[in-house]
Image (cartoon, helix red, strand yellow):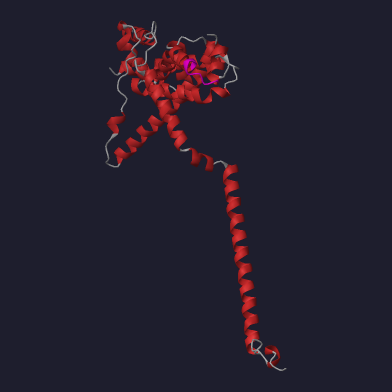
Amino acid sequence: MRDEQKLREEIEATLNSLEGIQRAKPSYYFESKLITRLENKAAKKSSWLFPQLAFRPSIAVAVLSAFVILNVVTIGTLLRQKSQTASSTELQGFAQEYNLGTTTLYDTNTIK
Amino acid sequence: MSESILIEALQRRERTAFSGLVSSYQKMVFNTALGIIQNKEEAEDVAQEVFIKVYESIGQFKGESKLSTWLYRITLTKALDWQRKKNRKKRFAIVKSLFGVNDELQYDQPDFEHPGILMENKERSVILFKAINMLPENQKVAFLLHKVEEQSHQEIADIMQTTVGAVESYMHRAKQHLRKSLAGYYKNL
């Protein structure tokens, strides 16, 4: 019984042990360390500016669209050039087959 | 400097205003983090993270609550996140130790002596802080804000964004839990 009473008293004393507590102080260099940390963070941020921009959805979509448009234009130009080359080769073959390139007497205008 | 003038100066990114904020609130922020983390170096790290967060997000502060209330909220969020991370590491170390890699000891929380405790209460407060560490988060926050930061129930309710009734309930349950833990501790001595 006496032990129970003693236990209760000890528990209450422990529960009240925070009475009169003073606020703890951080270290003397707290503020200077904080400023250094902020400056480091700002420097890191500016050096990572490009990836940050690239991860913005609007910028990423614009870059992707420009890339697709450039590809489409390039492929279109190439295809057009190829078809032009093919048609001129066909014409040359036709001209060769019928000797259209050979100059005739009429062409040389030798009859007087 | 009044609070609204200080906030406006902070929003304009004035360095002297930030310095003034740190000088005025560093003890409050550090002491709150220390109560939860129970380690000076780690609490100082968290306190610095709090001021960095304030510097970065002061533009979002609408003045709907007191600046100190906002600072308490950021501190508690950061400190509790830190504590959760630490507990996860501790659990992971225990699991690792089961598979033979024994680094459990390095995560054991050493006895914590709060530097602001009266000399005659030091020994008992070490036991109390151990018991506080085992409380559920809401009860721990309410108890520490009341006992260590000497905040009223109304101020705690504002910080925790709840009602005074809820704070009283957290306090009541926290004391019940603590009495039970302390009884177990003293009986096993």
* Residue at the extreme bottom: A111
**Which residue is at the front of the view, A37 or A46?**
A46
Query: Relative to A26, is B153 on the left or the right?
Result: right
User: Can you see residue B155?
Assistant: yes
Which quadrant: the C terminus of chain B?
A: top left
Tell me where residue B38 sits by quadrant.
top left
The residue lying at 70 percent from left, 90 percent from top is A109
User: Can you see residue B175?
Assistant: no
The residue lying at 38 percent from left, 30 percent from top is B86
The residue lying at 60 percent from left, 63 percent from top is A75
Query: Relative to B167, is B147 on the left or the right?
Result: left
**Which residue is at the front of the view, B155 or A98?**
A98
**Which residue is at the front of the view, A42 or B73?**
A42
Q: Is residue B16 on the magenta stretch?
A: yes
B148 in relation to B102, above or below: above
* Residue at the extreme front: A112
* Residue at the extreme right: A112
B1 in relation to B15, above or below: above
- Residue A15, percent from left and from top: 39, 11
- Residue B2, percent from left and from top: 55, 9
- Residue B165, percent from left and from top: 57, 14
- Residue A1, percent from left and from top: 33, 8
Tell me where residue B93 sits by quadrant.
top left
**Which residue is at the front of the view, A104 or A87?**
A104
> Which residues fall within the magenta stretch?
B12-17
